[in-house]
Amino acid sequence: MTSWIDFWDRPNAIYVNQRNLDAHFECLTRDIQRFVPAGGRKAVLDFGCGEALGAERLAEGCSTLYLYDAAPAVRKRLRKRLAHDGRIIVLDDQDLRRLDAGTIDLILVVSVIQYMAKDELVSLLRFWHRLLKPAGELIVADVIEPETSMLLDVASQLRFAWSHGFLLPALAGIARMFFSDYRELRRKAGFAMYPAGEIIGLLRGAGFDGAGLPANLGPGRHRRAYKGRKASALPLAEDRAIAMDQSPASLSAKVQLRLPR
């Protein structure tokens, strides 16, 4: 196994049981609903959506909810589970590339950027800028700051497990993960960390007014979240270069786009 896409395209021990998965997405969905309240009419793109167990609830605040994940097995499960809901569209790489510029109100990027190189993040930030409407917003969440120990992540997971009644399975899952290829993959495939100033600088460089949010989205309260509001159009020549040379399909072939949502 050489990529995060491969990791998420097969069974793994990130979520130790269904209670863990349900609790995780319940927490995440509740936090996201602050930006997508029920009764709204936003066009929303959840980029790197994972299993998206709260998609139907989020769709209550959307005209259209687009779900994109780079892992084919994840997309297949999403299509099977959500085919009945006309408000939700599951995108593959080609579908994502075909989205029209200036048509999305909100882009959610939760637990994604730690799995891509910095130059790939810069290209995607410009691509997301192009997709957004003039007053559109980008939420980048679950960002890990430098020097964050894996032990801090473990402690956070155990607190969450204790409060939701799956502590013993969580302990067993951490033991399985310790002896799996996860740590080696994290070392080889990369695991990016960013200080607040750098993230805000990257947002501004892509044409956003960037700022930190008071709290992260999801269970990892020690991680950070940021909001970027579309400030202005990128220079025409640069925007054309992004559209022609840095399409989502070509980016997704390079970027390792899955992580524990």
Image: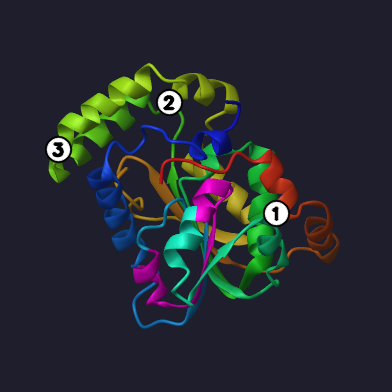
Q: Is residue 4 visible?
A: yes
As rendered, which of 255 and 209 lies closer to the eye? 255
Q: Which residues are magenta?
A: 55-76
> Looking at the image, which is closer to me, 158 or 122?
158
In the rendered structure, which amino acid carries the disc numbered 1? Pro
Task: Find residue 55 and report its horizontal and vertical position in percent.
Answer: 40, 65
Pointer 3 residue: 162
The answer for how far apart the CA atoms under marks 1 and 3 are is 39 Å
Assign a secondary structure to mark 3.
helix
Look at mark 2 in the image and give the residue it sits on: 147
Residue 210 included in the magenta stretch of the image: no
Classify mark 1: helix, strand or loop: helix
Q: Is residue 256 left or right of residue 39?
A: right
Question: Looking at the picture, which amino acid does disc 2 mark?
Answer: Glu
In 3D space, how far apart are the residues under numbered discs 2 and 3 (Cα atoms)?
Answer: 26 Å
Q: Where residue 76 sits in the image (x, y, percent)? A: 52, 54
Horizontally, is 123 left or right of 143 in the view?
right
**Residue 48 percent across, percent down from the top left:** 52, 51
Image height of 200 relative to 144, above or below: below
